[in-house]
Image (cartoon, rainbow, N blue to C red):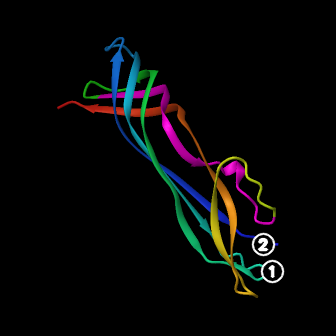
Amino acid sequence: YINTDVVYNSSVARAGITATYLFVRNNKLVPYISAKAGYAGFFSTFQVEDPRDAASCRVVLQHKKISSDGTAFWGYGAGLRVRTGTKYVENYLDISVQKIRGGEVKYANVNRLHHLTEPYVGTGGTPVKFDFINGTTRQVHEHTVAELYESPLKLLQISVTYIAYLKF
């Protein structure tokens, strides 16, 4: 039996533009609606760590970039700004909810990572494989540690932001 840690990292880089319409401007509470559009890049890596197990099956330590994908996105939402400033600094606590949609992106479902002690049974994704070396026989063999899936970008973004406008 092999006890190996598989480390999964995922990151998102996003650039875009947002348009906001404020219903009122000079109140303590400022409700608004907004629309946004841009591009989002998604990056995923797996790293298999050295198991040092009793079966002498040692991993060729690997770090793979398994997915580098991106898509255009668009979204809309609403929010509320609560004025907290003074006459010299205009401060707001901004609370918003946005629904964001985009094209197809690849991802690894971390709820479906495969344990190397179990036989691999595919679930419809693209297999992510790593090479291992048996410490006794020196034979290189593969194990599937995860699968990549593809689906449309669908996000619900809930944010709380502090905004400060300096007046000179």
- What is the number of the mark on residue 75? none
Q: Is 19 situated above or below 113?
A: above
Per the image, label 1 sits on a secondary structure element best described as loop
x and y, in percent, of residue 25 in the image: 32, 14
Which SS does the magenta portion mostly show? Answer: strand
Q: What residue sits right under mark 2 in the picture?
A: 2
Q: What residue sits right under mark 1 in the picture?
A: 55
Q: Is residue 70 left or right of residue 86?
A: right
Residue 143: name its quadrant.
Answer: bottom right
Total labels drawn: 2
Judge by depth and name the residue closer to the eye, 140 or 15. Answer: 140
As shown in the figure, which amino acid type bears the numbered disc 1?
Ala
> 10 Å neighbourhood of mark 2: few (<14), some, or many (≥20)?
some
Q: Is 83 situated above or below 144?
A: above
Query: Looking at this rendering, what residue extends furthest in the left direction?
Result: 168
Residue, x 36% and y 32% (percent of image)? 163
Residue, x 78% and y 72% (percent of image)? 2
Residue 40: name its quadrant.
Answer: top left
> 10 Å neighbourhood of mark 1: few (<14), some, or many (≥20)?
few
Magenta stretch: residue 121 in it? no
The residues bearing labels 2 and 1 have C-alpha atoms spaced at a distance of: 7 Å
On the question of residue 83 being in view, the answer is: no
x and y, in percent, of residue 109 in the image: 65, 48
Q: Are marks 2 and 1 in contact (CB under 8 Å)?
A: yes
Residue range highlighted in magenta: 90-117
Per the image, label 2 sits on a secondary structure element best described as loop
As shown in the figure, which amino acid type bears the numbered disc 2?
Ile
